[in-house]
Amino acid sequence: MKRAFLVALAVTLVALAIYPMHGTGYGVRTMLQLFMWIALAQSWNLISGLTGYVSFGHVAFFGMGAYTAGILIGKLGWAWPAACLAGGVMAMVLAVVIGWPCLRLKGPYFAIAMLGLNEVLRVIVSYYEGLTGGGNGLSLPTLHASVPIYYAMGLVALAVTALTYLIITSRFGLRLMTIREDEVAAEAMGIDTFRHKLYAFLLSAVGPGIVGGLAARDQGYIEPLSVFPLITTITMIVMALFGGKGTIWGPVLGAVVLFTFQELVWAHFIYLHQLFFGAIIVAVVLLMPRGILGVLQQKYNLPRTI
Amino acid sequence: MAPILELNGVVKRFGGVAAVNRVSLALERGRIYGLIGPNGSGKTTLFNCITGVDQADEGEVRFKGQRIDRLKPHQVFHLGIGRTFQVIRVFPELTALENLLVVTTTGYDEARRRAQELLEFVKLERLAGEFAGNLSYGQQKLVEFIRVLMTDPEMVLLDEPAAGVNRTLLNELLDAVRGLRDQGKTILLVEHDMKVVMGLCETVFVLDHGEKLAEGPPGVIQADERVIEAYFGR
Amino acid sequence: MVGQVVISGLLAGSLYAMVALGLGLIFGVMRVLNVAHGPILMLGAYTTFWLFHWFGLSPYLSLLVSMPALFAVGVVLQRLLVRRVVDAPELSSLLLTFGVSIAIVNLAQLTFTSDLRSVEYLTGSFILGPFAFSKARVIACFFAVLITAGAFWFLQKTRLGKALRAVSQSREVAQVCGIDVQRIHMLAFGVACALAAAGGSLVAVMVAIQPEMGQVYTFKAFLVIVLGGAGNYPGALLGGLLLGLVEQLSSLFLTTQVNEAVAYILLVLVLLVRPTGLLKGRAS
C-alpha cells in the first residue's frame, strides 16, 4: 500500500516536472498558482493545524514576502530567486516580531492579534510610500519567467510538504500537538510551549514569504489590496480545513480540490465564491472538523503520516 | 535535613477571594504527605502555586532551597517536580506511548525504552499504540501516573489519584506510590478518600477555606475536632 | 484643545464600550470569541440605513427595530451553530464564527452591493463654551450610555441577568443551581448581537456604510476585552473609554493613516505588559 503510494507520488512529480514543456502558457500559470496555494495551505497547517493556534492574518507573511521581493527587484535590481528568498527571511522576522508578544498567551488572544495584523500592515505600506509605492503600487521590470517560477513554486510546495512530514513524525511535532490537545498539561509536563509555538510560527511564515515574492515577480505588479487581501487567508484556511488540518496531505488535497473548483466555477462570481468558502468553513467545523483526511484517518485507523 | 519543599505564607487571590491564605508547609525528603480539606478549600490551587500554573500573590515557594514561585510550569517540571491532575489530562489524540515520549528530551531510544518499562510496570504494554482518548478511565489514569515518572522527578504531586478508580487498580497504584517513596522520592497527594489517606500518608495537612487548619500524623488528624468541624460543620 | 480631545475620546469610547460589552458577554458566558461581531454591527447599520431610506425613520427610532431584530438573529445563530462548538476546542469556535462572519459580509455584498451608503440625519455641532462636538457623536454617546446602563441593570438586578453572571463564573455550579444554561447561552448571544446592532445603528449616522465596515469594530471590541480583562464586564466599559481616549489623543500627534494602527500597537503593548487586562480579568 505504502509502496503503491510512493510510486504514484513519484510518477506525479515526474509528470509535473515535464509538464511545462508540453503545456500551454495558461496551463503553466494555472499550475503555478496551484503550487502556491499548496504551499500556503500547508504553511497555515504548520501553525494552526498542529498547535491549534488559529492564524487569521497569515496573508501578512505573503504580503511581506511580496513587498520585500518587489522592493529588492524593482528598486535595487536584485535577481528574483535571491529576492524571493529574502522575502522568506523577512517574513520570518515579521513572525518573530508578532509572535514574541502574542504567542505568550492562550489561543484566543493570539487570534485577536492576528485579526488586526492585516490592517496594520496596510497602514505601514501606505505610510512608507516612497519605498513601497503606497496605494499606487509597485511595478517590477517585465520579465517572462513563468516556467522558472513554476518550478520555484513547485519546489516550495514540495519543501513545505516535506517539512510538514519531518515535523509530524518527530517528537517536536508531537509536542506541538500537545499544545493543541491541552496546553496546560503540556506546560506541566515540561514542554516550553512558548518556544515551540514560536518555532512553528516561524516555520509557517517562510513558505508564504517566499511564495509571496514569487507571486509578485510573476504578476509584475503589487499593491496593498492585491497582496494583503483577507480572501487569501480565507482560502488558505478553507483548503487546509477541508483537506484535513493536522495531516500531511490534507492541505494538498484541499488545495487541489478547492482550487480546481475555484478555477472552473466560482472565480467569476467573487462574492458568491467567498460566501461559499465561508459556508464551507462553517460546514467543515460542524460536520467534519478534522477534514477529509482526518475523517479517513480516524475511520480506518490510518497512521499519522497521511 | 533541609526540607525538600517549603511554602512560606503563600497567598493566592481570585477576584476578592483568597483561595489560598497564608499557607506555610515544610516537606521532608522521602516521605508521603497528604493534603486534605473540604471542597473548595484551596488544595488544587495550592498545587497550582507550587507548579507554577498559578502565580502566588504573596509568599514564597522553595524547592531544595531555591525559590520557584516565579517560574513557569515547564521550568518547575525540569527542576524535578511532576504532577497529575484532578481531571485526567492525557493527550487524547496521542497514543499512550506518545504521551510518554513527549515528555522527554533525551535520546529517542532511551526514552522509548523507559516508556516501555513504565508501560509494563502498570501492565499496559499492549495498549502502547492506542490513542489515549480511547482508553478507559482507569487506563488513562495510569498513563497519566506513569507519564509523570518518565523523567524520574524527585517530587511527585498527585491530585486525587484514587478518584474513580476501582479497588484492585487502587491497590496497585498505592503500592506503586509506596515504591516511589522507597526510591527516595517525596510525594504529596490531594485526596478525598480518607482510607487512602490514612493508609498511605505519613503526615497530613488539612486545608479549610484556604488556610492550614492542622498538620500531623493521620491518626491525630482524624481525631482533631477542628478537622471534623470543617468537614461536617458544627 | 486637550479638553476637546478628551471629551471626544469619551464620546467615542462609550460606543466602543457598548459594543465590547456584547463581545464580552459571549466570551464570558460561552468562552467563544465571536469574530462575527463586527458584521452584526454592520447589519445594524444597514437596518438603520434602509429604514431611513425607505420610510424616513429616525435612526434613533430604528434602534427599536435593529436591536430586537439582531437579538433574534443572535439567538438563532447560537441555537443552530454556535451551540455545537461551545464545548469543542477553541479553535473550532474561532473558525466557526470566522466562517459565519465571511458569510454575513459576503451576503451583504451580494444583496446591498459595496456601494457606500450614508444616513444624512444630524449634522452640525453642539457648542459648549470653547468646545464643539458633533451632534451625532453626542447623541450616539447618550444612547450608548443609556443602553449600556440598561444592560448593566439587567445583569445586576434581574434574575436572568444574575443567572447569566452565574453561568459566566461557573457553568457547572449554575447548572447545579437549576439554571438552564442552554437558554442563558442563547440569551447572552442575543443580547450581545443587540448591543452590536445598537452600535451599528448609532454609527450609521457618522460613517460610511459598507459591508466591510464591521471588521475594524470586531478588532477594537476584542482589544477592549483585552484591556478590561476577559470576563470582567465593568472592565469592558473602562476599556472602551480608554480606547476612545487613546485614539483621540494620539490623533493629535499622528497622521490619520498611522492612527489606525494605534489600536493595534496598544493591543501588543497590553499583551506584552499585562495580558490579564488592566483590571483584574480572568486569564483564559
Image: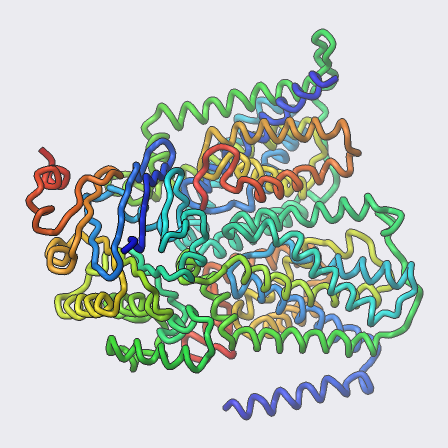
User: Which of C109/C161 is in front?
Assistant: C161
Tell me which corner region of the image, top left, top right, bottom left or bottom right, holds residue A127: top right
> How many numbered discs, if any?
0
Residue drawn 41% across and 23% down?
A: C153
Residue B234 position within the rendered picture, expressed as x and y whole percent measured from the top left: 9, 33
Residue C10 position within the rendered picture, expressed as x and y whole percent measured from the top left: 62, 22
Is residue A283 in view?
Answer: no
Tell me which corner region of the image, top left, top right, bottom left or bottom right, holds residue C29: top left
Direction left: furthest residue: B223
Residue C81 falls left or right of residue C109: left
Image: A34 above or below A95: below
Residue A16 falls left or right of residue A108: right
Residue A73 position within the rendered picture, expressed as x and y whole percent measured from the top left: 88, 63
Is residue A200 in view?
Answer: yes
Residue C21 falls left or right of residue A154: left
Residue drawn 30% across and 77% down?
A: B119
Q: What quarter of the picture does the N terminus of chain B occupy?
A: bottom left
Direction top: furthest residue: C129
Residue drawn 34% across and 61% down?
A: B82
Image: C213 above or below A235: above
Residue C209 falls left or right of residue B45: right
Residue A194 position within the rendered picture, expressed as x and y whole percent measured from the top left: 53, 57
Tell me which corner region of the image, top left, top right, bottom left or bottom right, holds residue B129: bottom left
Q: Which colour style is shown?
A: rainbow
